[in-house]
Image (tube, rainbow, N blue to C red):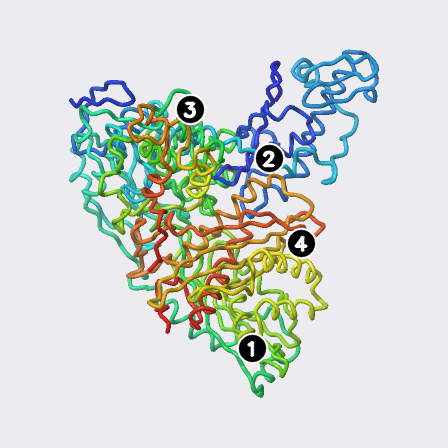
Amino acid sequence: MIAPDDTVTIRVGQSEMGQGVITSCAKMVAEELECDWSKVRAEYVSVNRHFRENKVYKRLTTTSSSSVRLGRPYLQQAGASARERLMAAAAQTWGVPRSELTVKDGVITHTPTRRTLRYGQVAQKAAAIKLPAEPKIKTPDQYTLLKKPTKLLDVPPKVDGSATYGIDVRVPGMLYAAVKASPVFKGKLKSYNADAVKNRPGVHSVVEFSGDEIEAGVAVVADSYWHARTALDALPIEWDEGMHGNDTSEGFFKSSRAALDEPGAKVVTKKGDPEALLENAPQVVEAIYEVPYLDHVVMEPFNCTAQVTPERVDLWVGSQEPEGATIDASKITGVPVKNIYLHNCFLGGGFGRRGNQDDVRQAVAIAKQLEGRPVKVIWSREETTRHGYYRPMRVSRFRAALGPDGMPAAWTTRVVGLDENYPGDEQVLRGLHKLPYFVPNQLFDYHLRKTHVPTGPWTSVGRSQNEFFLETFVDELAHAAGQDPYHYRRALLEANAEFPFAKSWTQVLGAVVEKSGWGKQLPAGTGMGIAIGDSRRLTRTEITICAVVATVAVSKKGEVRVERLDVAVDTGPFLVNPLAAERQVEMQVAMGLAAVLRQEITIEKGRVVQGNFDTYPLLRPSEIPEINVYFVRATDDPIAGIGEEVVGWVAPAVCNAIFAVTGKRIRSLPLKRHDLSWV
Amino acid sequence: MLSLRVNGKAYNLDVEPETPLLWVIRDTIGLTGTKFGCGMALCGACTVHLNGKPVRSCVTRVSQAAGQEITTIEGLSADAQHPAQIAWREGDVPECGYCQSGQIMAAAACSRRIPTRPTPIFNGKSPTFAAAVRICVSVRRSTAQLNLQPNGDELTGGSDDSHSRNESQGIRSNDLRRWWGISARPLIS
């Protein structure tokens, strides 16, 4: 949309949660539009219009690092189309051929006469023009705006308090709700005594909620959140815990470990006869790895504001899946999607958590009972932590037989995944489904089991577990072979003739090794660890190669300080916004490090133990290491993305560095469970 | 009825005295720049100034703030031109941005020389309250940004003279580091 004053408003279908996506999406349009970037504004698309006009905005999902990967072609096309319509309007105005016109920064020039028109002057005319054919879009070598670092459009409202997150929405006549869902997942609400709280100040009502993919529970609705919250705390509630009231995550680990001894239910890779070789090999390395459930820890506690009438539903929420949320609201209310209006907001963090719509389904179920009054449902921090869709816990066993040269002649991997919801098997396989390293005999099989604990996508989706296993195990092999972990990996890559990206990998690996000073003399008690991967998935061809070197100090008493993380990332032919990309890398380092050091969700009596930041700690500012990001061009095709392509290698790099100092191999996380003292 | 002064404006409010200041600011007065993050003074997203001192409004009863000068992010400066806000913009500090109002208010409080120290509960010594927790590294960018300013320690405008009358215009990054517990990087146990 171009206003007479040349302001360009670009509507973005992707959700802003700190990754800089509204800036990146606007840039991809502006690259072709050739407008003045300083006049560009970004706003969210209308989700309702998307449904009414046959999915006019293509995709409204913001997951899987896909905004640039999947959005770029059609966003560039939209910008190019708009530019050509503006040019055609100018050509008509002057009665000259299009070929005599040029454009820069939103000013169209008729070259022979030097006459100019601004976009704002021809925009109205251009709106009526239909192009005979769609123009071609630029290739990366023709970019002038993309590739350059661009300041982020969402920063100014985030420093003066004016940015509206879902939790900030205020609607006339709005009530507030505090909620408590069944502490044991998949439990039921047995009874509650509404009379005990109905006379408390401001209390409007007490309502139940349950349904398809809605954890059963109870809400207190009041004239302010504090009235609702304090009344909820005073509300006597009895739960039917169902059959999971005695389940524990320790029990899940135990049964997963037992499953390691059963042949995998499904076989992914089988090459040669690794098991026979392992039986007779002189040197066998074996390790069992375990990682816990993790929460996403969005800084903005879960919330959704909903208004349900028989004719229309309005939703105000920060969502990674506004399309799915609209469909869910329609199912619950019976109101057709064309009469549902989801007003997307800034998200105070996402990490995959805000694409489950459980917040929306619950709020709609509550609002349905309030006779058309809008209600803002806010979860406490504890409720937010205890009702997640967690990063699945996982157990694995790796075995390798080393040949006389120290290289693996046979290798077996068995994984026991406890996943549900997303995306089934694939999350268990990712990263392990194709070994980048040369091993002539391989077996990879797995079990997929379920518990009552909800799981879902967590930044990097599967790799934060699998890459810890794989890159720790390779390190173990290097040590067993008496070789430098960097050179060992390099040799295994170079030997793998079947791996098309071996050269690109060694380039990224080489970059991080050089920049980090790998192999240099370090003070006593300080060591380095390395890890690499490429975010390969079963269902797509794009990759992003990333290599990490961690420099870590460990005191003799076992206190850990991560000094420095050097991260090299392949950019492919371009990064849409290097500034945003660098921030994304840094964010993933912080997220990965917090998980390595202390984070775990444990289950006792069927419910989550952790609640607030005291029991589920984030990284403290004093723990943020020096982070150095190096962008390397190691491949020729556009990369998969950069929103989650780094986090998986933080844990193995840090733990390999700890081994270098202490000689203690970390095979389970978080570190707080380990005694790292050394002599 | 309870009288409150927020950003220079007087309010007479019908709220229970034990209500956390945070919810009065957000729900009753309607200033939503101050955020709810944890409700336990752990994350700092709710930080506001009480007579110029930073407090966590989620654990401050509204009655404790009655009759005193409360400043929220919306009232920190006219036109968002406080040195901290300028630094945050110049360094592209926020990511998701949710806790940034609180972090900016914490930084801004360090610019005031009277009294320079944060109240004991926030002085970085208590392990529980050591500093705001972070999911991102915005804090690193903000300190980096402060270091980029001329005169080393000063963000802008202020002089090194601790009795300077222009004191509210300068952020002492050492105070900020102390607040965030950054000056001495402790080992993690």
Q: CA distance from mark 3 to mark 4?
A: 47 Å
**In the image, which is nearer the foreground, mark 4 or mark 1?**
1
Residue A67 figure quarter: top right
On whether disc 4 and disc 1 are found on a single subunit, the reply is: yes
Q: Position of residue A468 (x, y in %)?
A: 50, 63
* Residue in the picture at 60% in, 47% down: A641
Q: What secondary structure is found at the residue carrying circle 3?
A: loop
Residue B28 falls left or right of residue A37: left
Residue ID for mark 1: A482
* Residue A320 point in image, percent of width and height: 49, 41
Chain identifier of the residue bearing label 1 in the image: A
Q: Amino acid at mark 2?
A: Cys
Q: Chain of mark 4?
A: A
Q: What chain is tagged by disc 2?
A: A
Precedes in sequence: disc 1 or disc 2: 2
Disc 1 or disc 2, which is closer to the eye?
A: 1
**In front: A675, or A161?**
A675
Which of the image's four quarters has the C terminus of chain A?
bottom left
Residue type marked 1: Gly
Task: Identify which amino acid the numbered label 4 is placed on.
Answer: Thr
Which residue is identified by label 4? Answer: A541
First in sequence, mark 4 or 2: give its number. 2
